[in-house]
Structure formats: C-alpha cells, structure tokens
Amino acid sequence: MGGTLGVLRNDLRCSNARVMIGRLESVIYRLIIVPLVAFLPAPFPYGFAVLVGDLRYKLYKPFRKEIEYALEQVFGSQLSFEERSRIARDWFRLRSCEAIDMMRLVGNGRALTRLVKTRGLEHVEAALAAGRGAILCSAHFGSYRCCFSVLGALGFPAALITNWSYDDDRLSPVDRLFSRLIRSLPVTHHLRRPNIVRREGKIGVAIEASIVLRENELIATMLDHSDYGDPVAPKDRTRPVPMKFLNREALMLPWIITIAQLMDAPMLMTFMRRSADWRHQVLEISPPISLEGDAETAFQRCLATVEAAIRRNPAHWEKWNVNALVQLGMLSAEDRFQRSGESN
C-alpha cells in the first residue's frame, strides 16, 4: 500500500509540475512575447507563433497524447496515426496564433481585420435591413475568441452570450486578472456592451437576447457549449438533448433556436478559418438557416454545419480533450479516468 501511495504522490507531483510549467510558459508568451512581436509585419509574429506551437507540441506530451486519443475515440479508423499527429500539432499552432490575433485587435482592430477576408457579410446587412436583428452562431472553432470581434471592428458589434472566464470563482485572483487583461479585454472591446452572461439562466438570457433583437441588433453564441455536467452552468437550464454529432451523440441545449423562432430572427452560421500561411483567415457567414420544424430539428441543421466545418479542418476545433468530450456526452466518465491513468 505504501508503495502504491508513493507512486500516486509522485504522479501527482509530476502532473502538478507540468501544469505549473505550462502556466508559466503561457504567462510569459502572452504577457511578454506576444505584445512585443504582434504588431510587426504579419509574417514574423505568425511564423513565430507556429514555432511556439511546434515547441508546445513536443514539450506537452501528455496533452498531445490526449488530443490524439480524443481524435481516435471520435473518428476511429477514419484518421490514421499520422493524421492524428498532424492534427494535434496544428491544434497547438492554432492556439499560439490565436494569441497574436487577440493582441492585434487592440485599438481599432485593423491590424487583424486587414488579414481577414469576409464572405457573406451581405447576409448580416440583409437581416438588419429587415429590422429583426440576427443571431450569429459559431462553435469553439479556429480563432473563435476573435471571430465576432472582427465583425465588431468592421462595424457590426454583437452581444455575445457567454460566461467570461474572469468571472469564474474557482480561479485565483491572479488567474482572473490574467484572463481579464490578456484573454478578454482585446476581444470585448469590439463587442456590444453589455454582453449577455449565461450564468443568469435560460430565462434571464432569453429576456436579454429578446431585447437586443427588438433593437435590431446582433447577438452571438457558440452552439457547442459543454453545459452538461458543468457545476457553474445555469441551474434552470433545459434538459440536454442527444444530437447526432461527429459519429456520436452529443448532449446539446437547443434553447437558442426557441429564441430565434419566437423573435422571427434569422440564424447565421459564422466561422473563421485560418489559411495555410497561418496569418490570413477567412470569416464566412452563411445564409439564414431554416428554422422550420421543432427546435431540435432546426438545431440539428445548425449542428450539421458545425460538424462539416470540423471535418474539413479538425485541428480548428478546440475541444479535443477528454474532459470537454465527457461534458458534451460524447465520451463516458470512465474515459476520463482511464485517460488520466494512461497520461500519468
């Protein structure tokens, strides 16, 4: 028993050490390096971010293995080992490049917007011309923290429905300050204020969203929130509904469809995809998604566009980790413990 406890303590110390090193590296990168290089000619900061992503891919082996494991569990034999490894490497590159994106949003945001080609902006303009506002839907895909802020910098600010990480009481004061300064302020600067906080519960969110739409403005949200099993999720949320998603069933909350149907507001799917040179991106806005049928049927249509985007660019989806997939109901809780043991 003593030997087993010793091994467990040693594994815990190693895990904690990896977490601390990773946090220190992230702080140095975001607080010092990114501000120094972000506004240089675009090839340099994004080229540097790719190198940082490659370094993280090599150093953070347990996290890399977890991404590859999640990909294998979802796609099975559809992806080879080499493809899973490439996707994991690109996942790290994308996260490093996103930090550059966020810094380039500072000020008027032109340092970033001039690198983004926008397609489908006419659908937003048509929705506003009709006087009913619009709901912009995306996922944790690509540079998702910057996606709606780019639209705001272009003159189309949206009220984002989200829970800001700096409001999470589980974080230390230092982590909350870091999140507010580095992850949130550059993004929220171009969004409609105030934004809509999901912790207020579905009734409060619905009321606030309806007010925004009545004022013929935009609201934005992510469809792949991991509310299921999340202790900080709204207490009055609706029951999660199983939806077909990426070869599996995911537990989703289609409440946003109900708001769109009640307010007769168009739903526009919105994704920002990074190009092969890593610095240029394409922001694509779809025509209105059909809202015919019940909320679950319409939500499945929206979710199908999310799945198609992920299948085309799997590294762009942030949620390739066991905890996120368990919260979405795509993996069982046993997978979390099994993977934790393998990582140690």
Image: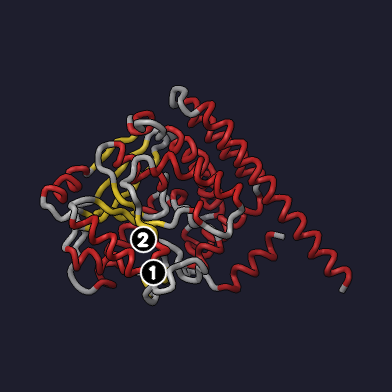
Q: Depth check: 303 or 276 in front?
A: 303
Colouring: secondary structure
Q: Residues within 10 Å of mark 2 (few under 14, many from 20)?
A: many
Q: Which residue lies most toward the right here?
A: 2
Q: Residue at x 52, y 69 (%)?
A: 231
Q: Residue at x 57, y 35 (%)?
A: 31
Please state the horizontal and vertical placement of residue 125, each as a whole percent of the image: 16, 45
Q: Is residue 184 above or below residue 117?
A: below
Q: Is residue 80 above or below residue 236?
A: above
Q: In this rendering, would 123 be left or right of 98?
A: left
Query: Badges 1 and 2: C-beta atoms under 8 Å apart?
Result: yes
Q: Residue at x 18, y 57 (%)?
A: 214
To which residue does mark 1 refer?
252
Question: Where the N terminus falls, by quadrant?
Answer: bottom right
To which residue does mark 2 refer?
223
Q: Quadrant of residue 261?
A: bottom left
Q: Depth check: 43 or 259 in front?
A: 259
Q: Which residue lies most toward the left here?
A: 130
Please state the horizontal and vertical placement of residue 134, each as a whole percent of the image: 21, 54
